Amino acid sequence: MSPIVRTENLSKTFRGTKALDGISLELEEGLIYGLVGRNGAGKTTLLTSLTGQTLPDAASTIELFGEAPSRANLARTHLARTGQTYPDDASVHQVLRMGRIAYRNWDQSLALSLLMDFRVPLTARARRLSDGQKSALGIAVALASRAELTLMDEPYTGLDPVARGIFYDRILQDFSANPRTFVISTHLIDEIAPLLNRVILLDEGRVVFTGDAEDAVYTAHEIAGSQDAVSVYLAKASLEGAVVRERSIGALRSAVLAAPLTDECHHLAAELGVNVQPVALQDTVAAHSGAASTHRTTGGAQ
């Protein structure tokens, strides 16, 4: 089966700066992808390039549903963007009407149910909604569109924890009943991690990792033990240059490494009597995004 999205050497240059730098990806149908990375990593540019809202550099290749982007296959996609704007006089109800016209699989009852859960009034002017209500409206439109490829760029800006919980519950319910492909760009990585089948990690416009969400955490790890044992571990594993964050308290030292946690790491740690473990997904992203700058913290009694 052909991937629902395929890119090859996808690049985008803004004023001499590479926002995307040779990205090659294949996205499968019926999975929820998390698109993660620091601000400026290229997440929004990638999403807008896939939907034709950003024109990539000339040598780039994008395929949607096995074909070059066209009006027909772009109509099978939806991008929910942060800060979505609406016509001055459009009410929430009219925004839903536009969605019903634009998407052949539109589910009006789902849209209304979501807005009720989020407490967004149908008669309010869309432009005058609070930031959280605008995000809720964007989520309602995205899910109700039932687009085969649904892209969401930081979809819950301004939503409180209760509203975010509603979003997580409803997307899982609807995805279970109506499988399709989601790509969700997010900074709340550990919070959304239970939803994700796959992770795409970007840093400075390049793909650092793409694969199963549970495998992503094994692309970085943390070591902790005595000062001497940790130093020996780093030297024997040739990982001194992979340290992105470390902390020392008296005779103890811990370090986060932008390096895979392998069987050899486990064996070496056991030999030296130190603790080694994968880090949370949020820390994995921070590790790969901060590999160029090491942070050291010291503490303890004087």
Image (cartoon, rainbow, N blue to C red):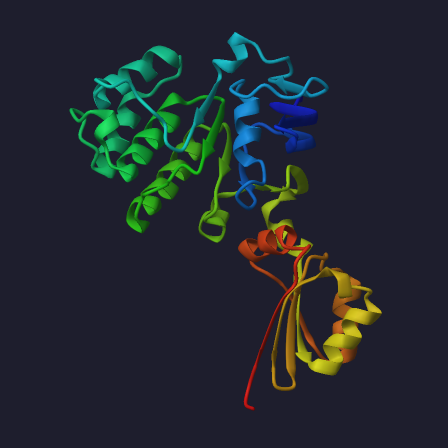
Q: Residue at x 58, y 36 (%)?
A: 42
Tag count in the figure?
A: 0
Outermost residue, bottom direction? 302
Figure check: 35 above or below 222: above
Q: Is residue 124 visible?
A: yes
Q: Quadrant of residue 299?
A: bottom right
Classify the position of the C terminus by image quarter. bottom right
Near-viewer residue (244 or 155): 244
Q: Is residue 30 visible?
A: no
Q: Residue at x 55, y 40 (%)?
A: 40
Classify the position of the N terminus by image quarter. top right
Q: Quadrant of residue 99?
A: top left
Q: Residue 86 appears at what percent x and percent y?
A: 30, 21
Q: Residue 267 appears at what percent x and percent y?
A: 78, 70
Figure check: 104 above or below 3: above
Q: Residue 75 appears at what percent x and percent y?
A: 47, 13
